[in-house]
Amino acid sequence: MNLHRLKAKWIYSNIKTRLILILTLVIGLAISMVGIVMYSLAKYSLLQEIKVPHQQMLTFARDDVDSKMADIITTSIYAVLDPKTIDFMHYDNHKNMDTILGLVSMLDTLTRNSSIIDSIYIYDGNNQHVVGSSPYGFNSSIETFGDKSWLPQLARVDKDTNKLTFVKRKKDQGEVISLIRRIYEDNKISGFLVINLKSSKLFSQMIPAESNVSEAIRIIQDSNGEILFSVGEPNKDILNPSRFFITQMTSTSTGWNYIYAVPQEQILGKVKWIRTMTFVVSAITMLIGMMIIFQIHRITFRPIERIIKMVQNHRNEAMEVDLIQLESYVGRLLTQLTVLHTSNKELKAKFLQDTVYGKLSRKEFDRKWRLLYSDWRSDLPVYAVIVSVDAYYKWLNEYKQDDQLVLKFAIGNIFEEVLGEGFRVQFEDLTQDRSAFIVQPLSPDIEIQMFYDKLQYGIEVTNKLLKISISIGVGEPLNPISSQLSIRYKQVEGLLLDRLYAGYQKLHVPEQALPYSEASGGGSKSETIHEIVQGIKEGKPEYVNSILEKIRIDWETAMAKPPFVFRWYSSLMKEMIKEFRDHDDDQFQEMMESLDSLHTLSFADLHLMASDEAAKLAEEVKKRKPTKHDNYLRKMIDFIQEHYPENIGVAHVAEAAGISPSQANSIFNQETGNAVYDYITRVRIEKAEQLLKNTNLKVTEVSEKVGYASENSFIRNFKKIKGVTPGKYKG
């Protein structure tokens, strides 16, 4: 025992041994610190990355519910103002069976027309009468009505007539969301309208797919904090940030709060396991390293120890041999610095993303800027720049996802090369159409016009080399640098909206921002979208196109604000797609997704997108829509196709259909947009075109074969339609 104590004392008193121990402890501490920092950064980055799809899911669910609620509110207004409802609220009319049956029929129609509505009641508060959609019908006494659990909720109806009340209640062994609205007569409350909604249909976007079942909890609360809908088991600790990772947002339309909560253990379980295993492996590695170091020390320094004992006068020089061992430790420390350098690049990318989205506080921004951009000068301005792909939804359809990433990085490389000689540049790809830059000139002598010229040149190079059309926005210079950089990026996003009027491949800078007026033109009326949809339903493409063209002219003349224009066109496209497209069709999803990138379109493309879709839908309806003149039209067309080589006119065509010449022309104009004679001429010219292409007949012979007695008349009509004479066309 005493021998072991002596050996331990000798090892501790040895300078080389103490140095090895100290270096080992320092390296172990460094490894531990790096591990803790990397774990913290990984945890933070993981949670932020996970938050994005959660926000997207909640946004989609919120917008879906808001859209459905807008339809329900419209239905409630219609039901309250319907003459049948007004008649029902007068007691004398209750004896009139036609009034009651008409009201029940109206409520049944409203219920059937919506997949969300379960049932509708109208309650006459003065006489205690109630009528509901099938199967409830009319009850002269509320006591005999089949569903009465909504009665206690009437006291909760907001006194403000402009507000609506939504309550969650029990009904038929289940739960429904009921909309309760007051009915007024002579400025007095005469009754209530109750619309019962199917929770599963209303909140369908909050229900996860079977393949995506997890421990996540999804909740929708009303403005009073009461739970209207939930997936999972909510409890009192659901909003505890130490136990759950929470994403939430509020609807400005309904005031409802949408919450997505995931147990942190579910997200971080594997990360914690990796962290623990990393520390265990590090500890084992350090222990093995120490054993190897001591063994090498024992063998390597044994001859030196003998020399030291023999030559005591040169002890100090001999002890310098220990410094050789520092090389291996320095090598390990350099390896750790390399890891930190790699992490620095990723941290810069995360910093730029957080800045663009405004997620950093002032103190956090200042701290990270000093840490990550210590080589950037504090006395020179910094510019916020965003590069946006023009007509983004078209670009998505042209390239695969992997190719899109490569092309975006290629865009970044082009601008780093273009700006590289006189500027510091950091590029980061953002979501969808955008990529962000932070740019700083290397010298105060560089003028801002030179910066603009280089960016414009980059736009041209990108289009030439990559065949990609882009627009660029630049914010006002920021000097000195501060958290205001996030506001500059918001300014840039506003400048890029000028693309609506300025077109593609433009540089948008504060000095050239477009002025907008508060005027919104004819398209500001909410009825306009309804008129367009109604025109499509009636199969009138020309009528629909005339409305859209008038709106385009009004807005371009008034220079209406782009956000208003984009919202209106988005609403129009949504209405058309939901009304006329099959929701299960792939094209439906593609069209809905394309609405997210409307802000990347010029006015010409935006108008063309809407007008083409409207015209296409109207034509489809028109083709499917039978008319009373179809039989006459078919007979006339068949007669013309068969007898065009003969000397026929309007009278012959009308006789073949059994109608008068004036009726024939009227039907032709109504159904085809052409007169009978114009159609005969077009058929003859098309047949002549085929003969000129496929035979060696002379122009005179072709003229006779398609029914022309005069060659000059044939040549004149052919040139009018085809733009060239028959001789030149034949070549």
Image (cartoon, helix red, strand yellow):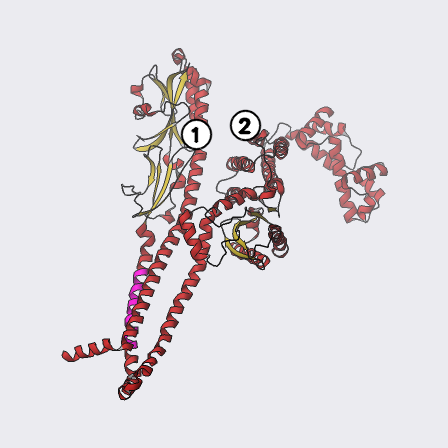
Residue 385 place in picture, x, y as percent: 54, 50
Q: In screen coordinates, is 88 left or right of 645? A: left
Which residue position holds label 1?
72
Residue type beneath disc 1: Ile
* Residue 660 seen in the current view: no
Residue 269 — which label? none
Residue at the image position 44 percent from the left and 34 percent from the top: 68
Residue at the image position 61 percent from the left and 42 percent from the top: 512
Secondary structure under tag 2 reads helix
* Residue 312 seen in the current view: yes
Residue 726 counted in the magenta span: no
Residue 527 — which label? 2
Badge 1 or badge 2: first in the primary sequence: 1
Q: Which residue is situated farthest in the left direction here?
A: 1
Q: Residues within 10 Å of mark 2 (few under 14, many from 20)?
A: few
- The residues colored magenta run 275-293
Indicate which label's residue lies in the foreground, 1 or 2: 2
